[in-house]
Image: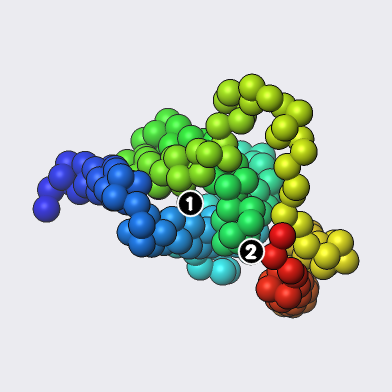
């Protein structure tokens, strides 16, 4: 397979998968949405941890830059910001409730990576990331019924304001966000030590998973309105 064909497939295959899944609907659409969220979420988590751990934690995507290289270009703070942003987006994508927010935030992230690697003349990377961008846009199209109010204001805002929101226990909600903030904040502890960073992130993950289970159980036990 020639590089040109491979690069073309990196974009065409996600385009075809998106068109077929959203067009056919049903179980195929659900499979597409779950698969895309898992893939993109894993890419973001891996990319963020890769940068924040000075390349000690392998990820599914790069870029392969160490702190020494970034220090030469005064980009250490920028790299940490991108790493935390990728980590946060990955966590959002891997949740059902906040996956749409993660997909919205992922669009500028992909555009940033595309133009950065394009300007640096990275071979192949812009095409591969464009394919990931197509999958992200597919997730946005899947949730267009929720996203459309950002583009077109509702004709009757008062009726929209009266719609009940699906929320969980306040204490569980606070605990969930505490776990997310702990994971994101402790990801910056690599200068202290990698062990401290991973241990604290693990505590945050346990808190987040425990709160997720609490919210799920409460939702199951709540009476149907």
- Give the residue at x 56% y 69%: 57
Choose between 169 and 40: the one closer to the eye.
169
In the rendered image, which quarter is residue 19 located in?
A: top left
Q: Residue 86: x percent and y percent?
A: 60, 51
- Give the residue at x 12% y 48%: 2
| Residue 30: mark in rendering | none
| Residue 53: mark in rendering | 2
- Give the residue at x 74% y 69%: 223
Say whether disc 1 or disc 2 marks the residue closer to the N-terminus.
Answer: 2
Colouring rule applied to residues: rainbow
Q: Is residue 67 visible?
A: no
In the rendered image, which quarter is residue 211 located in?
A: bottom right
Instruction: Decide if residue 44 is on the left or right side of residue 194.
Output: left
Q: Residue 36: x percent and y percent?
A: 43, 56
Gap in Å between the C-alphas at discs 1 and 2? 13 Å
Instruction: Decide if residue 109 is on the left or right side of residue 82.
Output: left
Pointer 1: what residue?
Answer: 63
């Amino acid at each position: 397979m020639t590089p040109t064909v491979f690069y073309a497939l990196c974009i065409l295959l996600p385009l075809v998968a998106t068109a077929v899944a959203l067009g056919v609907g049903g179980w195929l659409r659900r499979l597409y949405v779950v698969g895309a969220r898992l893939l993109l979420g894993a890419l973001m988590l891996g990319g963020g941890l890769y940068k924040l751990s000075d390349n000690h934690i392998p990820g599914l995507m790069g870029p392969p830059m160490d702190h020494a290289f970034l220090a030469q270009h005064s980009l250490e703070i920028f790299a940490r910001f991108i790493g935390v942003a990728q980590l946060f987006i990955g966590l959002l994508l891997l949740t059902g409730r906040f996956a749409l927010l993660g997909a919205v935030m992922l669009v500028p992230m992909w555009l940033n990576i595309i133009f950065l690697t394009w300007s640096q003349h990275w071979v192949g990377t812009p095409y591969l990331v464009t394919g990931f961008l197509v999958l992200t846009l597919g997730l946005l199209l899947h949730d267009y019924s929720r996203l459309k109010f950002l583009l077109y204001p509702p004709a009757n805002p008062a009726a929209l304001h009266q719609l009940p929101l699906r929320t969980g226990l306040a204490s569980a909600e606070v605990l969930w966000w505490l776990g997310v903030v702990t994971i994101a904040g402790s990801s910056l502890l690599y200068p202290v030590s990698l062990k401290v960073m991973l241990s604290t992130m693990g505590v945050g993950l346990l808190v987040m998973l425990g709160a997720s289970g609490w919210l799920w159980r409460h939702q199951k036990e709540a009476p149907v309105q």
